[in-house]
Image (cartoon, helix red, strand yellow):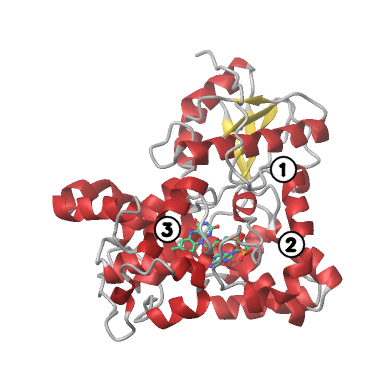
Amino acid sequence: METELKTITPFTGTPFASTREQAFQRWAEFAPAATSYARDRNFVKPGGHQSVTRLSPSIRMRLVREPELVTDLLSKHSIESVEKLAQELYWRGYWKGWLEWHPGVWADYLKRVSIAPETYSEAVLTRAREVAEGRSGVALMDRFARELIETGYVHNHARMWWSSFWVHVEGLPWELGASWYEQHLLDADAATNTLSWRWVAGLQTKDKSYLVRLSNLERFTDPALLAESAGLERFNDKIVKAVEIEETADLKLATPPKSDPMPADTSKTALWLHDEDLSVEHSCLRDLRPAGIVGTSPSIQSTWATKARTDYAQLAVADGLARASKHFGMPNEQLADASPEALAAWASARGLTHLVSLRPFTGRLDLNAFRETLKAAGVELICQRRVWDQTVISQSQRGFFPYWENMRKRLAKRQMPLE
Ligand SMILES: Cc1cc2nc3c(=O)[nH]c(=O)nc-3n(C[C@H](O)[C@H](O)[C@H](O)COP(=O)(O)OP(=O)(O)OC[C@H]3O[C@@H](n4cnc5c(N)ncnc54)[C@H](O)[C@@H]3O)c2cc1C
């Protein structure tokens, strides 16, 4: 099969950093606000969310990585003065690690989304669409819904309110809201999104749901956004009650996979970059002498990502590839077709024996499908796990706070791996 080279159409619809350089620029711009992050981060105001980093899309694709940002923070500040920001940056790793131990939760989400059209009545599905598209009749929530559709980003507190509105006020199925977020968020991440929705729904932490309440909305929302008050009475503190949701996921513990052994002979080994990790030159693969470099964005041709999300991912992959080319001193190719078949065709047309990649976490990139298809084409897939990932996973089997205590101690002693 012929593989086609992707021509990237410049995507200008996002103010979010889509290259590593832009991400560090945004980080530098944000730096003066780092010590006031704990105080300011929960306030939702118009004007581009300046009291948070807005780096989640870049962190999601690993244009920059949490340990780089936290190391930079701690080179300038005491851990006490920036602890909240460091903690939030490490939340994401915790969720990703937790899902590695509990892949049944991801499988359950995928299944629930796939059977939703037969599971729910037409009335439920119609209402879900109205709320998702910003036609709920609650002006503030409709504003957040429109922001998601128009920009691919929503402030964390607004995500909490909106998802709670969806689940506990509208009584809509949590997985349909999570799936809508997954399609639209530029930072859409299997672990963080699914587990945050489950946490709001009361599934993630036993007997604990997150409830949106008027007193909280009034405290943290800029008065300009509350001026349109239609529907706010539905959040009266005395009215909002948790909907009880049944657990359907298999919570059995799995053993998270580690790195595959590298081949003895790497002369016919190429590097595969994907949008789960786009800083390969800052990883254990930096000393490889690859026979080629190929990149794919798994959201292409998907039904779970909007065009804006796919465009963003393609820009990010192009940046990851450009840096890899510079580092390894060779050209790269970005495939238009992100399927296992296209990758296998690319590899076998070049007579390769192995493809090496940084191991993605549990999520949309179905490694087994790639492994099988490549194997059938005579190419072995080798996935290497970052030391940082391995460390984070080892601590994330249980709750966040023991995890954070452990990470905080390591950070204080400068014993946290960077890569
Ligand atoms: C229902 C719901 C769905 C969400 N879905 C996603 C998702 O798909 N992808 C995603 O990256 N985040 C998700 N989040 C978490 C959080 O809302 C975003 O990470 C954050 O709003 C991103 O904005 P920021 O980069 O300006 O964050 P900042 O406040 O500047 O935080 C810095 C970084 O820390 C991490 N972070 C911050 N808050 C959280 C959190 N609560 N959980 C995990 N990591 C966090 C992110 O990587 C973020 O970029 C979700 C939260 C909720 C309530």
The picture places residue 38, in percent across and down from the top left corner, at 65, 77
Q: Residue at x 60, y 59 (%)?
A: 47
Hey, what amino acid is under mark 3? Arg
Q: Quadrant of ligand 1?
A: bottom right
Label 2 lies in ligand 1 vicinity (Cβ under 8 Å): yes
Residue 411 vs 104, above or below: the answer is below
- Mark in front: 3 vs 2: 3
Q: Is mark 1 on a helix, strand or loop?
A: helix
**Which label number is shown at residue 357?**
none
**Badge 1 is on which residue?**
280
Q: Which residue matches tag 2?
A: 30
Determine whether 275 is above or below 391 in the image: above
Point out the tag, 2 or 1, that comes first from the N-terminus: 2
Instruction: Categorize mark 3 by other alpha carbons within 10 Å: few (<14), some (14-19), many (20+).
Output: some
Q: Which of 170 and 108 is in front in this view?
A: 170
Mark 3, secondary structure of its residue: helix
Q: How far apart are marks 3 and 2 (CA)?
A: 25 Å
Across and down, in percent, residue 394 comes to 60, 67
Placement of the C terminus among the 4 image quadrants: bottom right
Q: Can residue 186 be seen in this view?
A: yes
Q: Give the amino acid at mark 2.
A: Phe
Give the mark, 3 or 2, whose residue is nearer the N terminus. Answer: 2
Q: Are the two marked residues, 3 and 1, in contact with CB atoms closer than 8 angstroms?
A: no
User: Which residue is disc 3 drawn over?
Assistant: 143
Q: Name the outermost residue toward the bottom.
A: 238
How far across and down, in percent of the image, does residue 358 sit?
A: 64, 45
Q: How many labels does the image show?
A: 3
